[in-house]
Amino acid sequence: MATGFVKSERLRKLPPYLFAEIDRKKKAALAAGRDVINLGVGDPDRPTPAAIIESLKYHAQNPAFHQYALDQGSPELRRSIAAFCRARYGLELDPESEILPLIGSKEGIAHLPLAVLNPGDLSLVPDPCYPVYRSSSMFAGADVHVMPLEPGLGFRPDLAAIPQAAYDRARLMFLNYPNNPTGGVADLAFFEDVVARARATGFVVAQDAAYNEMFFAEPPPSILQVAGAKDVAIEFHSLSKTFNMTGWRVGFAIGGAPLIAALAQVKANTDSGIFTAIQHAGKTALDEYTTLATPIRALYRERRDAFVAALGRIGWNVTAPQATFYVWIPCPKGYRSTEICARLLDEADVVVTPGIGFGQTADGYIRAALTVETPRLLEAVERIGQLAL
């Protein structure tokens, strides 16, 4: 007798996708007519800059762009990516072999383990982390070794504390700096240590640089600035947060030709290229990077300063992030992250993200996204301050 559908084992092993659950609870509160201030999912609230929109309008009228796009991306976009990386990081990249445009950086991050890992291999994954690092490693059949991010090290993993046996089995290490959710940053010395270990042991480093252009202090480096990094590292960049383009789905990977070719092979067998008109709009964004990205950074700096100062006034001592548009907030004493998030939503109509959704080591934190206007951020803090916490 036929039975009901049962999900695959790989899906049943996954924890619930955090952001979908937050969205469900938020929608229920809104449906009930409550005035919710959403500091949950990191989605910019301001529109994409006009120059990028006008570029899309213009190029969308070209009938040649209405057909399938090249998997490897348009030559024009790849050349603009190369020019951007040269100007921003001093990198010399071959547009033909060391750059791969992506349908958002998430696509490339999710596909990379299929290009690198065999079943039974080990993937080194930070904790807390963007959940896709963990799930994509599991989909590839790999085991996951957790690297706790240490507050005392600026939310970097203690590389010396990782057992040598884990390094010996590892085929892939995920990093993410500037970091989501903690806002931690990494310098070249840290990347040099990582690259040296990768070259000595033979694992690949996947550095998620989606927030590299959302900085408030020193511009974050690229891991590819380290000598020899191209041999072992691939870096993922995104236009989503830099240019308020989350819905456009444009990103790119850079690295040595063999790694880019392996990722491109997975991509060619699983999806297609970016709509060509959007690629040209992405080219416009990168070509006008300084003009377009600078005011966006200034906006989030102003919001960060106001929000962190307001939290301090109600007794929540929070370190201001040096990058990203997230504030990583220690839970009040006696609370786990899910408990405090539930109280903030139920009693203050404020949505934040529980740290536990990013990893087991993060249950003592919550994440707030600076994706509402400053008056609403201050109102959120005022509401929180009225609770007996």
Image (spheres, rainbow, N blue to C red):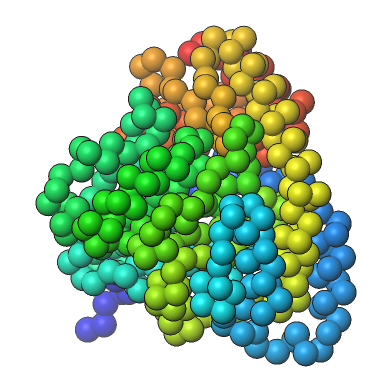
Residue lying at the far left of the rendered structure: 165
Residue 379 in sight here: yes
Q: Looking at the image, which residue is at 40% across and 46% down?
A: 191
Q: Judge left or right: residue 153 versus residue 264.
A: left
Residue 363 in sight here: no
Looking at this view, is 147 or 235 the one in front? 235
Looking at this view, is 19 or 269 the one in front? 269
Looking at this view, is 161 or 6 the one in front? 161
Q: Position of residue 334 (x, y in %)?
A: 36, 17
Classify residue 168 by image quadrant. bottom left
Q: Is residue 210 above or below residue 350?
A: below
Q: Looking at the image, which residue is at 44% across and 23% down?
A: 330
Q: Looking at the image, which residue is at 65% across and 84% down?
A: 69
On the rendered image, what quadrant is the N terminus found in?
Answer: bottom left
Classify residue 239 by image quadrant. bottom right
Q: Position of residue 62 (x, y in %)?
A: 83, 84
Q: Looking at the image, which residue is at 48% across and 13% down?
A: 389
Q: Is residue 78 above or below residue 368?
A: below
Q: Position of residue 317 (x, y in %)?
A: 51, 15
Q: Judge left or right: residue 345 versus residue 285.
A: left
* Tally of numbered discs: 0
Q: Position of residue 98 (x, y in %)?
A: 51, 72
Q: Judge left or right: residue 154 versus residue 3.
A: right
Looking at this view, is 345 or 182 the one in front? 182
